[in-house]
Amino acid sequence: MKRSLKLAVVAALALGATSAFATNGSVMIGTGAKARAMGGTGIGVSHGAESALTNPAMISMIKTDNEVSIGGTLFMPNVKYSAKDSTGGMFDASEKKSDADTFVIPAVSAASKVNDNFYMGVGIWGTSGLGVDYRDHGAGHMNMVTSLQSMQFGVPLVYAQDGFAIGVTPIVQYTSLDINYMDMMSGNDVGQGQATDINFGFNVGVKHTIDDITVGAVYKSKIKADIKDQLVNAMAPMEVGPMGFVNSDNTRYSNTKLASPAELGVGISYKLGESTFAFDYKRIFWSDADTYKDFKWHDQDVFALGYEYDAGKWAARAGYEYGKSAVRNTSNTLVNMFNALGFPGTQEHHLTTGGSYAFSDKVSIDGALTYGFQSKKTLDIPMNGKATVKHSEVGLTLQLNYNF
């Protein structure tokens, strides 16, 4: 375990920090190449060491005493915003593409078999984020720049016996939020710089295998971060008067917390010869997460299908994932505008593929290609206007595995 821990930490330092990205709202569909190639499934199917965050109980199915996975995702979102108000005034914005369009997201995992009943691991993962960059794109885009980033460090601990396993991953989460834009009324820049915090949470998962069927379940806790006055100051120019951002009584917006939402999921997989079929369902509780509930995000039901053909030396994978957008039209037009312009977590459909190749019994490589189909959402904004956000994305994941 000491050797695999050292490899994981060194690899994480080499890959560096995560940046802004999004899939289900602001949550990635998977944190490893195998899961991402299979539509994000991983609650009821094991992907070795990379399962530590998706369902820690699944690391009890590693095939050797130690396994290390070192990888990253090149993430390329394509977000476009346009708007039109009924007066032809300040909220008008021709369609422009966000310049925040290329990011690197690390994922490093290690797992070890301590004895027949106990497994443990370690990992560092980029898990969620969101961001746009509309600097110099015109007044209607407000020079909006947002960057939300989350990275998690976890140590999965698993007890297994007779096909059953239960695991828990204590988590340390790093969160960063930055919001900058131009106040359309005064022309002044609004922004407090980057707010960061480190907080704690956990994931707990179970799995049971009977013959060729494996079922699993997982719960991920909500993790709150103190973002200080980042949002308080960002919302101040928007909360006065009848169009107030959140507070209809003209009181100041005062929430200084941002929470990664809790998740609850179940999954099942069936192995038939060289083929494995997997299905996951999870619910993401945005409406109970600090700040997201102020932005009126809805809870999300996410469905994922995955398939793998394992020929031994190589494997092929494919998948599909769907989650209805957490961003919906609300009666508060400033909330709608800020969601569409600054936090467009509107992706819904993902198609995925990938595979593996084993160079030897110890070394293999995984790859995954994910494509988020373009979503188009139109929301009401001030002055009886309409804003349209279009959002598509491509992700390329590569991962090197070492077994010993």
Image (cartoon, grey):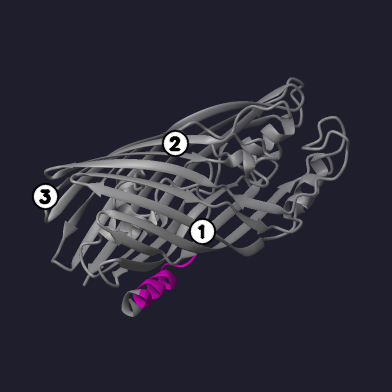
Pick whichever of labels 3 and 1 is earlier in the sequence.
Answer: 1
Residue 218 at x, y percent in the picture: 43, 48
Q: Residues within 10 Å of mark 2 (few under 14, many from 20)?
A: some
Main SS of residues in magenta? helix
Q: Which residue is mark 2?
A: 302
Q: Quadrant of residue 204?
A: bottom left
CA gap between label 3 and label 1 equals 35 Å
Give the residue at the far front of this rendering. Answer: 162
Q: Amino acid at mark 3?
A: Ala
Labels 3, 1: front one: 1
> Residue at left 34%, top 58%?
50
Residue 369 at x, y percent in the picture: 31, 46
> Residue at left 37%, top 71%?
8
Say which mark, if any, is on residue 13.
none
Work out whether residue 328 or residue 113 is closer to the camera in this orientation and state it: 113
Labels 1, 2: front one: 1
CA gap between label 1 and label 2 equals 20 Å
Q: Which residue is mark 1?
A: 202
Q: Which residue is mark 3?
A: 311
Query: Which residues fall within the magenta stretch?
Result: 5-18
CA gap between label 3 and label 2 equals 30 Å
Pick whichever of labels 1 and 2 is earlier in the sequence.
Answer: 1
Residue 224 at x, y percent in the picture: 63, 55
| Residue 73 highlighted magenta (yes or no) | no
SS assignment at label 2: strand
Pick whichever of labels 3 and 2 is earlier in the sequence.
Answer: 2
Q: Amino acid at mark 2?
A: Val
Left or right, residue 402 beside residue 52? left
